[in-house]
Amino acid sequence: MKLSKRTEWDTEESDLARAHRERLAAGLPVYDLTASNPTRCGFEYPADLLSPLADVAAFDYDPDPRGSLRAREAVCRYYLQRGASIEPDQVILTTSTSEAYSYLFKLLCDPDDTVLVPQPSYPLFDFLAVAEAIMLAPVPLVYDHGWQLDLEGLRRQIRSSTSVTRAVVLVHPNNPTGHFTKLDEARELASICREHGLALIVDEVFLDYGLEIAGQSEAEDTATFAARDLEIPVFIVSGISKICGLPQMKAAWLVAVGPGSRAALKRLEVLADTYLSMNAPVQSALPLWLDSRGGIQEQIRLRVRRNLAALDQILGEQGSKTNAGKAEGGVLVNHLQIEGGWYAVLRIPAIQRDEQTVRELLDLGVWVHPGYFFGMGESGWLVVSLLGAAAEFSVGISLMINYLQRNQVGYR
Ligand SMILES: Cc1ncc(COP(=O)(O)O)c(C=O)c1O
């Protein structure tokens, strides 16, 4: 049997993953600063969460390739509460945002066409692109008092691409940088898309987790793209893995707005009909889960705010204190500005490869993501999840800062 060249992945377990697995198997403590699965972070879910799955209506199989009307109406209600008026005809349900991306890449691209994706961002894009036989190029992001799109870099990328560019992906707010694409930036990006005939794909899975830090972001800057009239084709992807803290239920969607969306939806319906991947019980439960998302969202927002406050406090205590109580020795670690989502990007001294730092931290019982995992440089960046249990988070961060301080002294 010959297997395809494009799936010739290196499937060997990485040294880091092996070391992590072995440490857990040995029963040694691990303070997990990567915890991002809400079902494992000690939140309280309603005891009757699974009850709607037993609805006998799901015995009858009458598939609509776009997903059941009731479920799509619930998605429309969600957008209406966020200031966007969407019709059920503009919604296609999928089992995951990955599946939504795969439909969109099939819809918009022929093999070897290019899609621009933000960098740094979500690490799954590479695999999705390979699976769909398309090429990726970065939408560069720059950090200057907050993250911004490098629109000139984006233009250069489109001009220099060796294949035809079809679409731009944004993650709003982005993972792991936690920044929203502001309305002005979105408008400038839209004019580039219009000029080059590109569609915009916007991943809004973290939309409901804006931090609402005073003076930092205007409501129009954190609004859904479904409410921004950009006059270009926009496909929004989202789902209940983050919105309802239910990654195990496998329910997501895409919403098409703007010029050309009617024709696109007809083709998307054919794609969805080819797989018919949504199951009936989850679709019948979706309205209830979506309508009652407030309880879990409140817990998640509180956890993220508290962990961020703990992070700020621990980072503020860096350096030894003089007798007069003043901090001496510089600040080694800081976190970049965060507007939303549940990650923090940490700037650390770039004195060795982050892979080594992460390995050494693991030996001390702290498990953290290196920034390169999200497309950042190989030295100087760590990413921590703000979702983990508060006590575990604080201990993990303190151990990490102590290690980084000792390591820096050793380096000097
Ligand atoms: C930006 C982004 N989009 C999508 C997902 C996954 O969504 P789903 O579970 O619906 O595939 C994640 C998961 O971490 C994510 O970070």
Image (cartoon, rainbow, N blue to C red):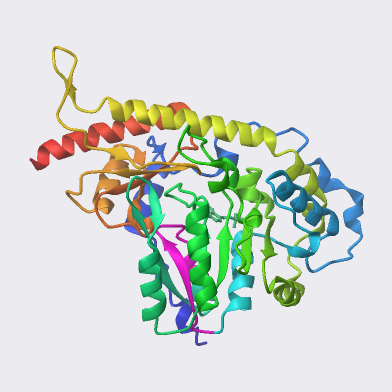
Residue 308 locus on image (x, y percent) = 43, 32
Is residue 126 visible in the rendered image? The answer is: no
Residue 388 locus on image (x, y percent) = 48, 35
* Quarter occupied by the C terminus: top left
Q: Is residue 169 above or below residue 286?
A: below
Residue 360 locus on image (x, y percent) = 25, 44
Q: Is residue 134 above or below residue 286?
A: below
Q: Please state if 407 lies on the left or on the right of 391 as rendered.
A: left
Rendering quadrant holding ligand 1:
bottom right
Is residue 291 visible in the rendered image? The answer is: yes
Residue 221 locus on image (x, y percent) = 53, 47
Q: Which residue is the extreme one toward the left?
A: 412
Q: Nearer the viewer, residue 97 or 399?
A: 97
Q: Is residue 280 above or below residue 110?
A: above
Q: Which residue is the extreme one toward the bottom?
A: 2
What segment carries the magenta color? 111-128
Q: Nearer the viewer, residue 317 or 192?
A: 192
Residue 120 lies within the magenta run: yes
Q: Please state if 314 lies on the left or on the right of 167 as rendered.
A: left
